[in-house]
Image (cartoon, grey):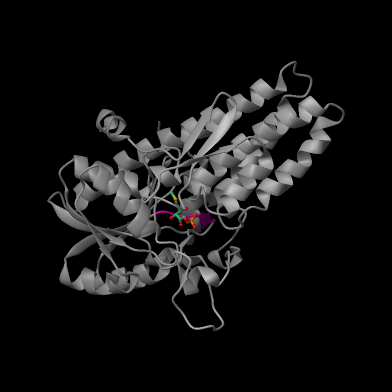
């Protein structure tokens, strides 16, 4: 599986090259394929806020490189560079509130910075940490793909229809994807007849990004309105709903793209299995339950305009971009540390004590 996934890896969202961070502009895909060059932490924070780069793991990885860019400029400016770097950490941390990977990556960089006290070349140390965060995400995705495919084979070995929401692919991660990595793996193993992809309003991560990634690899895709998912579960024999996560809490509740919760309710009603795929960097054991997750709300114009064209009346809007799926609606959470079936607090605590499987 590993080699075939490696061979299938075509798309990437993040490129660290010659000390510059290049981010693929995901606001314009698939119509335009351009990259944005970031040379300081402010540029990376802006790219995260404006969704040039999005997806919890990709946000964390980009922020880690943002710290390296900030440190280089602060070191060059001389004086108390570590104190000055605090402003960059704060800017990056405030870019978007829900994805746990952002604070996880910044904490990793901060711990490394601490250990680099007295080092002759702290910049090299910070760069190595950011690169390791990037590489370990790719590796985690590969392990999760294997675990997810084994689960699909265990439950139904035959060819089947899957449904996914948002974008959890190579564009949202360090490579391969989380939920989309499992879907890729299942396709490579001949177990996927068709993937149904919710368009995922208002940013259309499904119809723009997921459909583009899967079509590029010849994986049969059908895009549907978010509101069609329940009907498809009934009419098209969907066997699994496979999604990603932005923050998983200590009791196994999952915050993910708005619309994921209603998918889980429909899946439970139709007896469709519900799989969440996310690296342990998305798990926040400091929060007891999903009620404690800060849900990002964005500007209403994202709802009332499409491509800059107004499509709705001038009214009040709710544009919360994530929701919480309670643990009791989830069949399995797949991580690089292993799987948790029917998640609860005890099982999540056990999982977090385990080492990574790869
Ligand atoms: O608003 P976005 O596009 O950053 O939301 C992304 C998602 O919800 C993804 O499902 C999640 O981050 C997991 S990505 C592997």
Expressed as whole percent of the image width and height from the top left, the position of residue 97 reads 61, 57
Q: Is residue 170 visible?
A: yes
List the single residue furthest toward the left: 158
Q: In the picture, residue 307 is in which quadrant? A: bottom left
Q: Which residues are magenta?
A: 244-249
Q: In the picture, residue 41 is in which quadrant? A: top right
Question: Is residue 230 depicted above or below 108 in this figure?
Answer: below
List the single residue furthest toward the front: 309
Q: Is 7 left or right of 170, judged from the image as shown?
A: left
Which part of the image, by quadrant, shows the N terminus? Answer: top left
List the single residue furthest toward the top: 120
Q: Is residue 332 visible?
A: no
Taking the spot 22% from the left edge, 70% from the top edge, the residue there is 232
97 or 191: which is nearer to us?
97
**Residue 33 is one of the magenta-drawn residues:** no
Taking the spot 84% from the left edge, 26% from the top edge, the residue there is 78
Q: Is 179 left or right of 248, judged from the image as shown?
A: left
Q: Is 90 left or right of 238, judged from the image as shown?
A: right
Expressed as whole percent of the image width and height from the top left, the position of residue 151 reads 26, 48
Which part of the image, by quadrant, shows the C terminus? Answer: top left
Expressed as whole percent of the image width and height from the top left, the position of residue 247 reads 52, 55
- Label count reads 0
268 or 118: which is nearer to us?
118
124 or 69: which is nearer to us?
69
Expressed as whole percent of the image width and height from the top left, the position of residue 260 reads 40, 65
Taking the spot 42% from the left edge, 35% from the top edge, the residue there is 138
Q: Is 342 left or right of 220, judged from the image as shown?
A: right
Q: In the picture, residue 69 is in which quadrant? A: top right
Taking the spot 64% from the left edge, 52% from the top edge, the residue there is 95
């Amino acid at each position: 599986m590993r080699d075939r996934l490696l061979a299938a890896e075509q798309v990437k969202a993040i490129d660290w090259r010659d000390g510059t961070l290049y981010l693929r502009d995901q606001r314009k895909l698939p119509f335009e394929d351009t990259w944005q060059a970031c040379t300081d932490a402010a540029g990376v924070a802006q790219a995260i806020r404006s969704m040039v780069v999005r997806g919890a793991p990709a946000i964390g990885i980009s922020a880690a490189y943002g710290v390296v860019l900030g440190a280089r400029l602060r070191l060059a400016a001389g004086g108390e560079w570590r104190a000055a770097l605090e402003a960059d950490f704060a800017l990056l941390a405030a870019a978007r509130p829900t994805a746990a990977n952002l604070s996880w990556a910044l904490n990793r960089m901060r711990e490394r910075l601490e250990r680099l006290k007295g080092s002759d070349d702290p910049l090299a140390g910070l760069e190595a940490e950011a690169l390791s965060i990037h590489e370990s995400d790719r590796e985690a995705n590969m392990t999760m793909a294997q675990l997810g495919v084994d689960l699909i084979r265990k439950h139904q070995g035959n060819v089947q229809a899957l449904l996914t929401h948002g974008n959890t692919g190579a564009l949202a991660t360090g490579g391969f994807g989380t939920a989309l990595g499992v879907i890729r793996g299942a396709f490579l193993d001949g177990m996927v007849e068709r993937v149904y992809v919710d368009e995922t309003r208002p940013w259309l991560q499904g119809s723009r990004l997921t459909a583009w990634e899967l079509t590029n690899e010849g994986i049969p895709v059908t895009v549907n309105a978010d509101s069609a998912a329940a009907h498809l579960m009934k009419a098209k024999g969907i066997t699994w709903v496979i999604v990603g996560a932005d923050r998983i809490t200590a009791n196994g509740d999952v915050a993910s793209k708005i619309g994921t919760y209603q998918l889980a309710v429909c899946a439970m009603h139709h007896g469709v299995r519900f799989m969440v795929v996310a690296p342990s960097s998305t798990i926040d054991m400091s929060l007891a339950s999903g009620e404690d997750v800060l849900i990002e709300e964005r500007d209403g114009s994202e709802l009332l305009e499409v491509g800059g064209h107004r499509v709705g009346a001038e009214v009040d809007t709710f544009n919360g971009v994530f929701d919480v799926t309670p643990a009791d609606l989830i069949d399995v959470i797949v991580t690089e540390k292993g799987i948790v079936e029917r998640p609860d607090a005890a099982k999540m605590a056990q999982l977090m004590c385990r080492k990574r499987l790869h």
